[in-house]
Amino acid sequence: DVESLLAIADLILLPSEEEAFGLAALEAMSCAVPVVATRVGGLPEVVEDGKNGFLLPPGDVEGMARACLDLLADPGRHGEFRTAARQRAVSHFDTSLIVPRYEAFYQEILGA
C-alpha cells in the first residue's frame, strides 16, 4: 500500500531523466512528504523548488544528495516543507478542482 509507505517516509527522491507528469511526486506531497526531483517533464508544475521540495538538473547526483541531507538535517525546514507539500497537493491538484476542469475541457472539445 503506497499510502502506508509514504506515511513513514521523510522525503521522496525522484531522479528521473524523463517524466510525463509526476504522479509519484503528487502522491508523496498529498501525504505531506517533500520531494527532491529532477527538473523534467511535469515535475516543475508539481514541485515548487525551495518551498515543498527541490528540483535539480537530471544527472546531478551530488546536488540531489546534498538537497536530501540538508533538508533532513534541518527539522524546522523539513516540517515547513512537509506542510507546504500537502498544501500544494490539496490546493492545486485535489479531485474537486481537477475533475470539473476535465469535464469542461471535454465538453468544449465535443461541442457540448
Image (cartoon, rainbow, N blue to C red):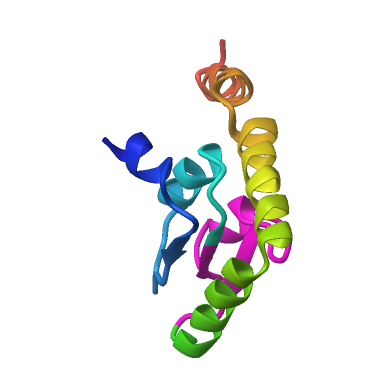
Q: Position of residue 106 (x, y in %)?
A: 51, 22
Q: Position of residue 70 (x, y in %)?
A: 62, 76
Residue 33, given in percent of the width and then of the height, sits at 53, 49
Q: Position of residue 80 (x, y in %)?
A: 73, 52
Residue 77, quarter of picture: bottom right
Q: Is residue 106 left or right of residue 83?
A: left
Q: Residue 85 colored magenta?
A: no
Task: Report the residue that reaches farthest toward the top.
Answer: 112
Identified at 49% across, 89% down, the residue is 62
Looking at the image, residue 23 lies above or below residue 94 = below
Q: Magenta includes 50?
A: yes
Q: Could you tell me which residue is drawn at 54 percent across and 20 percent down?
A: 99
Residue 21 seen in this snapshot? no
Image quadrant in which the C terminus is located = top right
Q: Quadrant of the N terminus?
A: top left
Tell me: 105 left or right of 8. Answer: right
Is residue 89 shown to the viewer in this render? yes
Residues in magenta?
36-58
Please give the count of numbered marks on the rendered protein.
0
Please tell me whether residue 36 is drawn above or below residue 21 in the rendered image: below
Q: Nearer the viewer, residue 78 or 91?
A: 78
- 65 shown above or below 3: below
Residue at screen point 63% across, 31% down: 90
Between residues 107 and 48, which one lies in front from this camera angle? 48
